[in-house]
Image: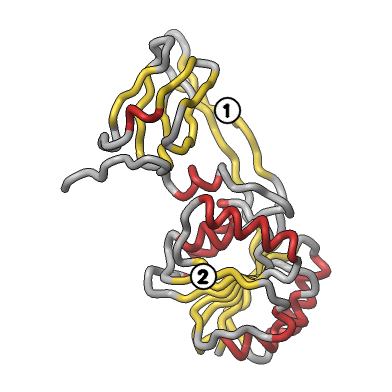
């Protein structure tokens, strides 16, 4: 299969002693020297490029996780570890339509857009809406429709596959969720507090099934080797509590 050529103003990931997500234009400067990114235009992903100090980098196509590092954050975002659990539990795919209520910086909407057909994202606060709009424009995401609208007035879409809620008093939005979600579709509510979890579960017991509450913890490990080449593992970092997620499926 023919590899795609690198275009001017596109994003690339420079892999070296450190990694950098950069837009292909002008000159990029880091601790390893200056890199003339214009030399990459028309080249294939996987091309080697050197800084003026002779440091080597490989220019590859960035993943959605790489690109999310460039997103400007305003409110707290749903981290990839939690966003990935949404994919794993709900099974949404390239044919799925998703509603995302509480856009914030559009971190979750952008993440999901890489896996589904379309994301409609609602944000009532104008300042967050503007940040999200700029993030979507910057990363050239084409399948996210952003709306500056309060979801308490209802969603415009019907028969969708997944609805995510990351906002205050989500239990008050459940009637709107019920109207727009297809039978068998999933709702996922991000709850930072245990008290909120109870309110959400109580509000969905009648019309939803497969109700589950998840807390997603992660530990990163490193391996080292002694003089006898025996391996030893140790914890590098531990991602503690970020929030609860309530999963529920419409009957």
Comparing 176 with 248, the one in front is 176
What residue did someone put label 2 on?
A: 119
What residue did someone put label 1 on?
A: 234
Residue lying at the far left in this picture: please name it. Answer: 1
Callout 2: SS: strand
Decide if residue 167 is on the left or right side of residue 28: right
Give the vertical position of 90 relative to 204 (above or below): above
Number of the front mark, 1 or 2:
2
Locate the C terminus by quadrant: bottom right
Residue 35 appears in the picture as rendered: yes
Decide if residue 90 is on the left or right side of residue 107: left
The spot of residue 13 in percent (x, y) is: 42, 36
When asked about the image quadrant of residue 134, the answer is bottom right
The spot of residue 140 in percent (x, y) is: 47, 55
When asked about the image quadrant of residue 4, the answer is top left
Callout 1: SS: strand
Say which label, 1 or 2, has the lower sequence index: 2
Comparing 27 with 78, the one in front is 27
Residue at the spot 54% in from the left edge and 17% down from the top edge: 31
Q: How crowded is mark 2: few (under 14 residues within 10 Å), some or many (20 or more)?
A: many
Residue lying at the far right in this picture: please name it. Answer: 195
Name the image colouring. Answer: secondary structure
Residue at the spot 61% in from the left edge and 86% down from the top edge: 208
Residue at the spot 49% in from the left edge and 47% down from the top edge: 65
Residue at the spot 66% in from the left edge and 55% down from the top edge: 131
């Amino acid at each position: 299969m023919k590899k795609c050529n690198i275009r001017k103003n596109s994003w690339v990931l420079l892999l070296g002693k450190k990694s950098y997500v950069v837009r292909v234009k002008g000159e990029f400067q880091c601790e390893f020297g200056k890199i003339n990114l214009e030399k990459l235009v028309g080249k294939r992903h996987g091309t080697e490029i050197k800084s003026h100090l002779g440091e080597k980098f490989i220019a590859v196509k960035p993943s959605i996780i790489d690109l999310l590092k460039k997103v400007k954050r305003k409110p707290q975002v749903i981290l990839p570890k939690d966003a990935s659990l949404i994919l794993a539990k709900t099974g949404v795919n390239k044919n799925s339509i998703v509603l995302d209520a509480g856009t914030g910086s559009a971190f979750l909407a952008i993440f999901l857009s890489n896996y589904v057909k379309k994301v409609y994202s609602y944000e009532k606060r104008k300042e967050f809406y503007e940040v999200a709009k700029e993030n979507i424009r910057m990363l050239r995401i084409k399948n996210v429709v952003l709306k500056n609208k309060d979801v308490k007035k209802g969603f415009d879409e019907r028969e969708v596959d997944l609805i995510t809620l990351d906002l205050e008093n989500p239990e008050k939005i459940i009637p709107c969720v019920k109207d727009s979600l297809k039978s068998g579709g999933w709702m996922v509510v991000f709850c930072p507090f245990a008290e909120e979890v109870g309110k959400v579960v109580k509000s969905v017991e009648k019309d939803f099934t497969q109700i589950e509450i998840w807390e997603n913890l992660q530990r990163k490990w490193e391996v080292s080797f002694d003089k006898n080449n025996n391996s030893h593992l140790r914890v590098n970092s531990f991602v503690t509590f970020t929030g609860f997620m309530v999963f529920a499926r419409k009957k």
